């Protein structure tokens, strides 16, 4: 074999090696490009994901803050309401007892108007007056006040109208002309409505 015959085969082999090398380099470049692209996409996803996480934490914080403020306000309202209810309970604790005493006062009022003025009954009337005054003082000490209704304009929040009669005078129209049962306040609140007759 001559030198010339060996060289064309060698050239072919060299060319193949060279082509293989170039193909490998190209495939490596393509692989690198794909890897870079994947890394860029991955980092973009992470950034996006991280941003979403940050936004959700911020939203969660705002929600928790809002809930805390609402709960705080609700608790404050509850505390104020219970304090007010306690104050009302202590203020009006004896309301039922005082209300049940009012018929006794009514009886005393009737007794006082019908007391005879004879000399022999003077001791009895003084005793009844003394007891009556003591009960009135007791009621006053507990915040019970008598309601002034006679010749006052009729007020359904204060008075119970039992009947209407023709007014004896023109200026008494729509006003109370007679009180059948006295009304009372307990510390500014109506304890018992006055039963009245209204002029029309």
Image (cartoon, grey):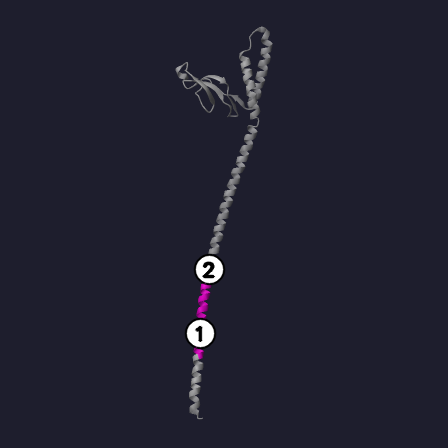
Q: Residue furthest front?
A: 163
Q: Is residue 79 left or right of residue 5?
A: right
Q: Is residue 32 above or below residue 105?
A: below
| Secondary structure predominantly adopted by residues drawn in magenta | helix
Q: Residue furthest bottom?
A: 1
Residue at image coords 49%, 48%? 63
Location of residue 199 in the rendering, given as x and y in whole percent from the top left corner: 42, 17
- Mark 2 Cα within 10 Å, few/some/many (few <14, many 20+)? few
Disc assigned to residue 27: 1
Q: CA distance from mark 1 to mark 2?
A: 30 Å
Q: Residue furthest left?
A: 170
Is disc 2 placed on a helix, strand or loop? helix
Q: Residue furthest top?
A: 119
In the rendered structure, which disc, 1 or 2, sits on the residue that comes first in sequence?
A: 1
Residue at image coords 54%, 37%? 79
Q: Is residue 28 magenta?
A: yes
- Mark 1 Cα within 10 Å, few/some/many (few <14, many 20+)? few
The quarter of the rendered structure image containing the N terminus is bottom left
Q: In this picture, which residue range is highlighted in magenta?
A: 20-47
Residue at image coords 40%, 16%? 171
Is disc 1 placed on a helix, strand or loop? helix
Location of residue 44 in the rendering, given as x and y in whole percent from the top left corner: 45, 61
Q: Which residue is mark 2?
A: 47
Q: Is residue 116 above or below residue 65?
A: above
The quarter of the rendered structure image containing the C terminus is top left
> Which residue occupies the foreground of this view, 72 or 180?
180
Q: Is residue 140 magenta?
A: no
Q: Nearer the viewer, mark 1 or mark 2?
A: 1
Residue at image coords 59%, 8%? 121
Disc assigned to residue 110: none
Question: How many circles with numbers are drawn on the protein?
Answer: 2
Q: Is residue 114 above or below residue 76?
A: above
């Amino acid at each position: 074999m001559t030198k010339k015959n060996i060289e064309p085969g060698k050239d072919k082999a060299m060319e193949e090696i060279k082509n293989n090398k170039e193909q490998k380099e190209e495939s490596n470049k393509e692989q690198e490009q794909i890897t870079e692209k994947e890394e860029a996409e991955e980092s973009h996803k992470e950034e996006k994901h991280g941003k979403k996480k940050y936004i959700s934490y911020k939203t969660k914080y705002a929600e928790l803050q809002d809930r805390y403020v609402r709960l705080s306000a609700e608790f404050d309202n509850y505390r104020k309401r219970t304090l007010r209810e306690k104050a009302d309970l202590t203020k009006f604790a004896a309301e039922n007892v005082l209300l049940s005493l009012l018929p006794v006062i009514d009886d005393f009022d009737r007794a006082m108007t019908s007391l005879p003025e004879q000399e022999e009954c003077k001791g009895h009337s003084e005793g009844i007056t003394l007891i009556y005054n003591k009960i009135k003082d007791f009621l006053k000490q507990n915040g019970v006040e008598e309601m002034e209704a006679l010749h006052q304009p009729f007020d359904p929040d204060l008075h119970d109208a039992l009947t209407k009669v023709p007014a004896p005078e023109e200026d008494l129209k729509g006003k109370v002309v007679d009180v059948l049962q006295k009304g009372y306040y307990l510390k500014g609140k109506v304890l018992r409505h006055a039963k009245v007759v209204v002029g029309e």
